Each structure stands twice: as structure tokens, then as C-alpha cells.
Image (cartoon, rainbow, N blue to C red):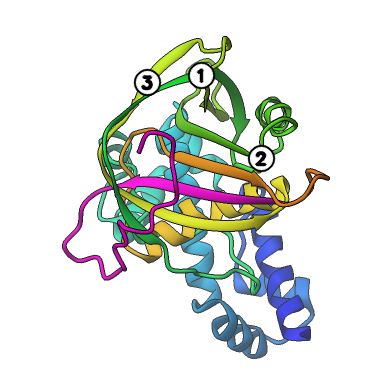
Amino acid sequence: MIKNLIVNSVTQYIEENIEIKHIDIEGLVSYSGYSRRYLQKIFKNKIGFSIGKYIQLRRISRAAVLLRLTSLSLSSISTRLCYDSQQTFTREFKKNTGYTPLQYRNNKLLTFQGMIGHRDTNDLFPYPKLYHIDKKTIDGFLFKHKEKLPYTGEQSKVRLREINKRLISAKTVYLSNKISLGKDFNNGVLITTIIWTNSEQVNTQFEINSGLYAGFLFTGSHKSYSHFIYHIYMNLLPFYNLTKRDEFDIEIISKEDNTCTSFSFQCYIPVLENDQLDLPCDVSSLPAIPGC
């Protein structure tokens, strides 16, 4: 228990300071009050990486998000993440991802292979199930909101309000989301959400493309679900060698009780076909989706 608290405190410290100052093992020894050897031992045991490698991968992963989802210059990203030079940033990024920062920014696919998100000792790595979903045309109510980076879900009030409004009269809500570059601001992304509906509120029609989808299940509050979504993209997809397609996902949100404090979330992420995947493909047990 104490070891978990120490490690979680260290990873949280790294997360809060990664864009503020250079972080290394000596600074963490001073912060934690524990010896270098002891801290390295329990960190590697609980997280699976040495402290130095974890810091390196978190910087690279944060840079990857900024490269793909903002228009910040390479020099701005390098400075923001406390690299001593743009050349060091470029060299370290390519060493860990196989791409130069510019190649990664221009890549049509959003992949986080070889990267990691913020971790703590409570994180779980549940197996996703793979489903094949046929093409479907959906009527829906479209709205958008902005999110700052790094993503925390704190800006999602408009999204949450629209979902809760519908959960008052319905037990389950179906929706789809897509993330795009926030072109009018440099520190965030634009999230398009479409709630599936056949009511008079329909203001758009879109297509769910056929293909492979990775399904993840979660039960809890909206706030904890925001963390789980982050965990899916930054930890689970790269861990299971899954690459997201640039298409709308599918979410199914159901009330667990009448208080609207606990929910069941089903999240289906469009992913590329990959012969190297070693995951169960379970078409027959796909949860009921209207029209599918």
C-alpha cells in the first residue's frame, strides 16, 4: 500500500511538472525523500519501466499529442517540454517512435505505438474485444466543444449536459465522437459529438463506416470515464498494438440507477485490420445497436 502511494505520487509529480521544468531521478529522490536505489526498484516493479525511461516516454507521448492535435511549431513543442534544443527533441522522438516529429505530424494515421500515457498503480489493462460493424447511416443531433491539452475532460460540460438531458427520459443514449485540430487555438482540440436520434432535433446525417472496432467496457461516474477514455487512447491501444482509424467512434451510455451518478459505458473505437493482433474477435455478442 505504501509503495503504491509513493509510486503514484511520483508519476503525478512527473505529470504536473513535465511542461514546467526538467525532471530527472535526482529531482525525484529529493521530492520523495527515498533513496535512488529504492525508488528505482519499486517504480520498475509497479509501473514496468525505469524512472528515466518513463519520463522519456511521457515527454515523447505528450509531444505526439501536441504534434497531431495542435498547430504549435516544433520549436514551441520542444521548449514547452523542456528539451535543451529542438535537435535533441527530434533525435529523441525519432529514436522512440521511428518518425521524425514532422513525419509523425504528417502521418495520416494517429498511432501511439511505443508511447505511454500517465500511469499509476491502479490502472488496469483489460482485453478489448474486436467487433466487425457494418456500414450504417445515422440521423443525429450534432454539437461541438473544445478541450484543452493535456486532456482532462474538464471542458466537457456542454457534452455532459446534452447526454444527461436525454438520460432523464431514456435509459440508454447512443452517440459518436470525432477529434479534430482546433485551428483557432493552439492549446486544444475540437470534439464533434453526434447523439443518435430520430426526433425533431435531428440536424445532421452521417455514416458509421464498416470495419473493425475495439470494444471497451467501463462502469462508473462521468469523471472517472474521462480518465478511462484517456487510458484507452494513450495506454490500451498502443499496449495491444491497435491503431485508430480517423473515423467516428460509437459510445453507448446507460444509467445504472435513477440518480444519474453511475453509468455503464460501452466504447467502440474504429481500428485498422492487423494480422498480428492476438485478441478475441467476437462478432456474435455485439451489443444491440439500433439498425445494426
Q: In the rendered structure, which amino acid carries the disc numbered 1?
A: Asn
User: Which residues make up the magenta segment?
Assistant: 263-292
From the image, tell me which residue sits under label 2: 171
Q: CA distance from mark 3 to mark 1?
A: 13 Å
Residue 185 point in image, percent of width and height: 56, 20
Q: CA distance from mark 3 to mark 2?
A: 24 Å
Residue 284 point in image, percent of width and height: 32, 58
From the image, tell me which residue sits under label 3: 206
Is residue 276 one of those drawn in magenta?
yes
> Which is nearer the eye, 148 or 221?
221
Q: Is residue 84 at all visible to an observer of this figure?
A: no
> Which is nearer the eye, 252 or 102?
252
Mark 1 crowdedness (10 Å alpha carbons): few <14, some 14-19, many ≥20: few
Rendered residue at 66%/43% (across/down): 152
Q: In the rendered structure, which amino acid carries the disc numbered 2?
A: Lys
Residue 282 point in image, percent of width and height: 32, 62
Mark 2 crowdedness (10 Å alpha carbons): few <14, some 14-19, many ≥20: few
Comparing marks 3 and 1, which lies closer to the viewer? 1
Q: In the displayed structure, does residue 13 sit left or right of residue 259?
A: left
Q: CA distance from mark 1 to mark 2?
A: 16 Å
Rendered residue at 68%/25% (across/down): 162
